[in-house]
Image (cartoon, grey):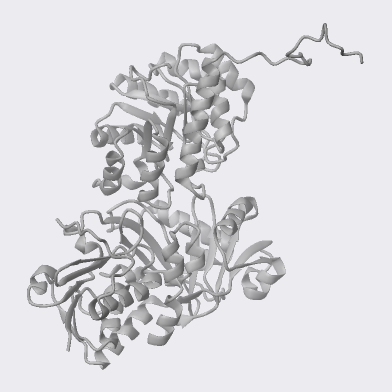
C-alpha cells in the first residue's frame, strides 16, 4: 500500500463526519468500520471564535487520524485561511483541499485548486487536493508539491459511483507511483471495491454512510468491500476477454455426444 | 405536600412545573429572565408536533414519546392546530422524497391535485408529496404563555433570579431545567445552533407545516396565522449564538422562495438564533443525584418531547418509577 506523506494507513477507508443523525451514530460508524481517517469540515462551524469546538472535540475523541477539509470554500483565500485554522485546531499538516467552482454541481475550481495547493505546500502543509480525473490538472498539482491526488468518482453527494472508468484508469496508469484516493460520488460498497480493484489506494466517502438508514451497518459494509477490493487488486486479477474460455479442456471429453 | 423548585422556565421547566402541579406538588419556578422571552431557546422553536416526520432521522423514542405531545398541549393550552404535515420536494429531488417515505410511517402519498386540495396556494407547484394526517403544530410563544398563566392561576410562584441548582437541592427537591446553561455541570451536553426567520406574507395562506426536502438545505415553514410564517431551521454544530450567518439567511429564504415565489415579497419580522442543548445521541435525559434532578438534551424536540419527559419526572418523584430516559450513572463535573 502506498503511503500518504510518509504515513501508512491501516486500511483504505477515509470517512466523513457530516450529516449523521447524531454524534453517537457517527461514533458507532467509526467503531464498526475501523475507518483509518476521519475527515472534518471547519467551514460552517468555524465562525470566528472556535464555536465548533464541542463537535471537533467529539471528532478528536474518535481516536483516528483527522484529515480536516476546506469544504464549502469557493476562493483560494478562503481555502488557505480555513487550512490554517484547521492546522491550529487539529495540530496536523494534512489538509483535504477543496475549492468549489460551482455551488450547484460542487465541481472543483481546478485553477484555484492548483494555486491554493501551491500556497499551502510552500507553507508546509501536506495537501490532499480534491480534483477531477483531468491528467493535466493532476500533473500541475504534483508540480506545485502535492504528493497525493484525490480524483472524484462522481459529483459530491451524487452516489453515482465511478462515472468515468476510462479517465480513472488513465490517471492510475499515468501516475503509477502517486497515492490516489477516490473522493466523492461513492454510493455503494461495490463502487468502493471497484475503485480498489482499479488500483486506487483509498476511498473517501461521507453521504453514502451518513444518509444510510443504518449508518454503522453501511460503514462496516464499506470496510469489508474495501478490504475485498484491496485483496483482489493485490491478487493480480485476470484479464477480461471477449470469448468464452473453458476452464476445463474439452479435448478428451465426450463433448460430441 | 411535596415542595419542588424548578429552575428554568423554558419549555422543559414549564412542562415539568405543570406535571408536578397536576400531581399536587407545591412548585416554585425560578428563571433568569423576567417572564417569557428570547433568552429561552424554546422561544425560537418551530412548534411542530411531528413525531412521524422526525422519525426520518431521530431514534425510536422520539417517535413513540412524541405521540403524547399533541393531546397534552391541546389539554393545557389553546395553541394547538391539528392539521397534519405536508412534505414535498422539488421535481429534481424526488429521490429525497422516496427516501423520506422509506424512513417514516403514518403518511399517505398525495398527488398534485390532493396537494392543491390541502393547500390551494401550492397548487401546480408539486406533483407528489407525503401527508402526515396525524401530526399537529402549535404556536410556541402562545403555548408557553398559556402554560405560565395556568400555573400562576394554580398558585405556582415565579421568581426572577440566577439560581444555583445545587444550592437549592441542599434545601429541598430541585429540578434543573436550564437547557444549555447547565453545560457547566453536564459536560456531554453540546450546542446545536439553529437559525430561523419570522416572515409576514399576507398574500399566502398555508394551514399546516410544510417541509421542503432538499439534499443540503431542508426547510420547514410553520404558519402562525394572520399571514405570519416561521421559517426554519438550520442545524449547525456550533456554539455561536449571537448572529445569524448570511449563508443561513440566503439558504432559508431561497428555499422559501422555491416553495412559493410569493415569499419574495414577504416582510422579515424577526431573525432568530439560539443553541439547542443536545446529548451525543440527540435524546433527552433525566439524571438524579439525591435531591437534584436534571432534565436536559431536548435538542430540536422541545415541544415534542417535553410532555413525556415532564410526565416521567413526576413519576420519578411521586411513584419512584425509573424513567426510560434516566441515566443509570450520573456524570457530573
Residue A129 visible in the displayed image: yes
Measured as percent of width and height from the top left, residue A56 is found at: 29, 43
Residue A73 visible in the displayed image: no
Q: Nearer the viewer, residue A234 or B202?
A: A234
Tag count? 0
Report the residue that reaches farthest toward the right.
A257
Quadrant location of residue B262? bottom right
Q: Is residue B99 above or below residue B112?
A: above
Measured as percent of width and height from the top left, residue B21 is found at: 26, 86
Q: Is residue B242 above or below residue A199?
A: below
Measured as percent of width and height from the top left, residue A69 is found at: 38, 35
Tell whether B135 sits left or right of B116.
Answer: left
Give the residue at x 20% y 63%.
B182
Give the residue at x 63% y 74%.
B118
Q: Is residue B284 above or below residue B173?
A: above
Quadrant location of residue B198? bottom left
Which part of the image, by quadrant, shows the C terminus of chain A?
A: top right
Q: Nearer the viewer, residue A99 or B169?
A: B169
Q: Is residue A55 above or below residue B7?
A: above
Q: Nearer the viewer, residue A23 or B246?
A: A23
Report the residue that reaches farthest toward the top.
A251
Measured as percent of width and height from the top left, residue B257 is found at: 54, 61
Amino acid at each position: 500500500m502506498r503511503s500518504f506523506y510518509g504515513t501508512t494507513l491501516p486500511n483504505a477507508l477515509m470517512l466523513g463526519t457530516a450529516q449523521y443523525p447524531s454524534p453517537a451514530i457517527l461514533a458507532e460508524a467509526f467503531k464498526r468500520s475501523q475507518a483509518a481517517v476521519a475527515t472534518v469540515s471547519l467551514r460552517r462551524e468555524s465562525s470566528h471564535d472556535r464555536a465548533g469546538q464541542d463537535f471537533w472535540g467529539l471528532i478528536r475523541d474518535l481516536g483516528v487520524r483527522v484529515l480536516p477539509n476546506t469544504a464549502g470554500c469557493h476562493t483560494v483565500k478562503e481555502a488557505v485561511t480555513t487550512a490554517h485554522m484547521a492546522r491550529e485546531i487539529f495540530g496536523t499538516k494534512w489538509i483535504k483541499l477543496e475549492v468549489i467552482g460551482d455551488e450547484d454541481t460542487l465541481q472543483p475550481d481546478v485553477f484555484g485548486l492548483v494555486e491554493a495547493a501551491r500556497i499551502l505546500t510552500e507553507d508546509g502543509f501536506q495537501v490532499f487536493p480534491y480534483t477531477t480525473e483531468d491528467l493535466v490538472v493532476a500533473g500541475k498539482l504534483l508540480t506545485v508539491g502535492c504528493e497525493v491526488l484525490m480524483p472524484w468518482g462522481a459529483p459530491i453527494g451524487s452516489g453515482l459511483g465511478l462515472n468515468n472508468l476510462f479517465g480513472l484508469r488513465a490517471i492510475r496508469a499515468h501516475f503509477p507511483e502517486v497515492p490516489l484516493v477516490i473522493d466523492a460520488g461513492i454510493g455503494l460498497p461495490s463502487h468502493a471495491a471497484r475503485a480498489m480493484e482499479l488500483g486506487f489506494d483509498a476511498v473517501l466517502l461521507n453521504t453514502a454512510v451518513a444518509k444510510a438508514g443504518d449508518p454503522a451497518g453501511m460503514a462496516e459494509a464499506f470496510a469489508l468491500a474495501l478490504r475485498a477490493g484491496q485483496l483482489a487488486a493485490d491478487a493480480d486479477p485476470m484479464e477480461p476477454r471477449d470469448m468464452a474460455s473453458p476452464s476445463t479442456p474439452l479435448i478428451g471429453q465426450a463433448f460430441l455426444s | 405536600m411535596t415542595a419542588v423548585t424548578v429552575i428554568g422556565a423554558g419549555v422543559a421547566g414549564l412542562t415539568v412545573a405543570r406535571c408536578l402541579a397536576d400531581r399536587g406538588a407545591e412548585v416554585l419556578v425560578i428563571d433568569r429572565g423576567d417572564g417569557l422571552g428570547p433568552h429561552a431557546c424554546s422561544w425560537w422553536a418551530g412548534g411542530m408536533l411531528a413525531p412521524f416526520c422526525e422519525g426520518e432521522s431521530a431514534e425510536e423514542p422520539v417517535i413513540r414519546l412524541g405521540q403524547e405531545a399533541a393531546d397534552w398541549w391541546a389539554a393545557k393550552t389553546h395553541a394547538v392546530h391539528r392539521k397534519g404535515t405536508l412534505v414535498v420536494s422539488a421535481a429534481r429531488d424526488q429521490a429525497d422524497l422516496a427516501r423520506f417515505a422509506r424512513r417514516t410511517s403514518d403518511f399517505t402519498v398525495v398527488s398534485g391535485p390532493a396537494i392543491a386540495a390541502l393547500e390551494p396556494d401550492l397548487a401546480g407547484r408539486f406533483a407528489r408529496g407525503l401527508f402526515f394526517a396525524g401530526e399537529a403544530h402549535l404556536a410556541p410563544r402562545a403555548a408557553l404563555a398559556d402554560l405560565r398563566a395556568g400555573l400562576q392561576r394554580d398558585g405556582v410562584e415565579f421568581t426572577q433570579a440566577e439560581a444555583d441548582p445545587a444550592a437549592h437541592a441542599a434545601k429541598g427537591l430541585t429540578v434543573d431545567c436550564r437547557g444549555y446553561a447547565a453545560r457547566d455541570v453536564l459536560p456531554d451536553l453540546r450546542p446545536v445552533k439553529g437559525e430561523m426567520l419570522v416572515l409576514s406574507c399576507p398574500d399566502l395562506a398555508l394551514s399546516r407545516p410544510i417541509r421542503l426536502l432538499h439534499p443540503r438545505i431542508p426547510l420547514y415553514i410553520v404558519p402562525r396565522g394572520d399571514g405570519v410564517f416561521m421559517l426554519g431551521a438550520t442545524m449547525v454544530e456550533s456554539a455561536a449564538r449571537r448572529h445569524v450567518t448570511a449563508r443561513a439567511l440566503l439558504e432559508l429564504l431561497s428555499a422559501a422562495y422555491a416553495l412559493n415565489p410569493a415569499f419574495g415579497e414577504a416582510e422579515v419580522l424577526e431573525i432568530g438564533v439560539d443553541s439547542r442543548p443536545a446529548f451525543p445521541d440527540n435524546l433527552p435525559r433525566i439524571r438524579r443525584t439525591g435531591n437534584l434532578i436534571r432534565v436536559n438534551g431536548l435538542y430540536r424536540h422541545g415541544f415534542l418531547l417535553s410532555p413525556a419527559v415532564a410526565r416521567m419526572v413526576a413519576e420519578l418523584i411521586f411513584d419512584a418509577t425509573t424513567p426510560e430516559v434516566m441515566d443509570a450513572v450520573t456524570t457530573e463535573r
